[in-house]
Image (cartoon, rainbow, N blue to C red):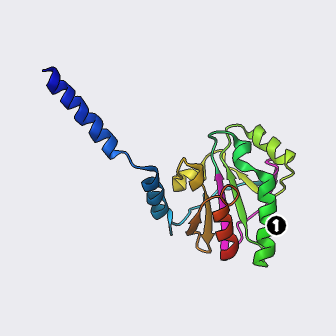
Amino acid sequence: MNFIKLLLLSSIFLAFFACQESKKDKIIRLVKEWQGKEIVFPANMTFTIYGKDTIDYKIPQSDYKILVYVDSIGCTSCKLQLPKWKEFICKLDSSANKEIPVLFFFQPKDKKEIQFILKRDKFNYPVCLDTENGLDRENHFSSLQTFQTFLLDKENRVVAIGNPIHNTGVKSFTLNRL
C-alpha cells in the first residue's frame, strides 16, 4: 500500500513539474502573444506634470510611440530610472529627427511617492497617474516588468516589447528602428 501511495505521489510531482513552463518558453509565448496586439487606451486619462499639475495633453498622432506602464509592485524608483529616461528621450528625438511620444502610465500604490520621485528627478514630461488602473484593465499586462514597455506603431499595435533603459538590445533596436 505504501508503494502505491509513493508511486501516486511521484506521478503527481512529475506531472506538476512537466507542466511547468520554462522561462524561455514563457518569454517566447509572451512575445508571440503581444506582437501586433493593439493597445487600448482608457477614455478618461488625465496627464500631469510632476504628478500634480493637470495639463491638457492628448496622445499625439505619430508613426511610433513608446508606452511605459509601471505597476505598483516593487521598488518604483528602481523601476523608473527617470534620469536615464530623460537621456534616452533626448537621444530618441535627435536620432529620429522628430518627436517620438513616450507615454508614462503609473499605477501607483502611493501617489505621494510618485510625485516625490518625479519632482526629485526633475522629470517634467507628461505622465498619467492611472489610479483606477484603467490601462491595465483594458490590456491585461504581464506582471513581469520586462513586458510592460512597448514600441507602438501609429495604430497603437505592438512592434517591440522591452524596456530600453533596462536592456541595451532593446535600446539599440528602438533607436535604429526610428
Q: Count up the numbered dots.
A: 1
> Which residue lies at the image location 61% right of the left edge and 62% below the top edge?
150
Q: Residue furthest bottom?
A: 97
* Residue 87 pos. (x, y %): 81, 61
67 inside magenta stretch: yes
Please tell me which residue lies in front, 78 or 11. 11
> Which residue lies at the image location 81% right of the left edge and 48% below the top edge?
118
> Which residue lies at the image location 68% right of the left edge and 65% below the top edge?
171
* Residue 59 pos. (x, y %): 70, 66
Residue 62 showing in the rendered view: no
41 inside magenta stretch: no
Q: Residue furthest top?
A: 2
CA neighbours of label 1 inside 10 A, class few (<14), some (14 to 19), many (20+): few
In terms of image quadrants, where is residue 151?
bottom right
Q: Is residue 2 above or below residue 78?
A: above
> Which residue lies at the image location 79% right of the left edge and 79% below the top edge?
97
* Residue 6 pos. (x, y %): 21, 26
Q: Is residue 128 left or right of residue 28?
A: right
Q: Which residues are magenta?
A: 49-69
Q: Is residue 112 left or right of residue 107?
A: right
Q: Is residue 36 left or right of residue 131?
A: left
Quadrant where the image shows the N terminus:
top left
Please tell me which residue lies in front, 73 or 124. 73
Label 1 is placed on what type of residue? Cys
Q: Which residue is mark 1?
A: 90
Quadrant where the image shows the C terminus:
bottom right
* Residue 66 pos. (x, y %): 67, 65
Q: Residue furthest left?
A: 1
Residue 48 showing in the rendered view: yes
In terms of image quadrants, where is residue 124?
bottom right
Mark 1 lies on a secondary structure that is: helix
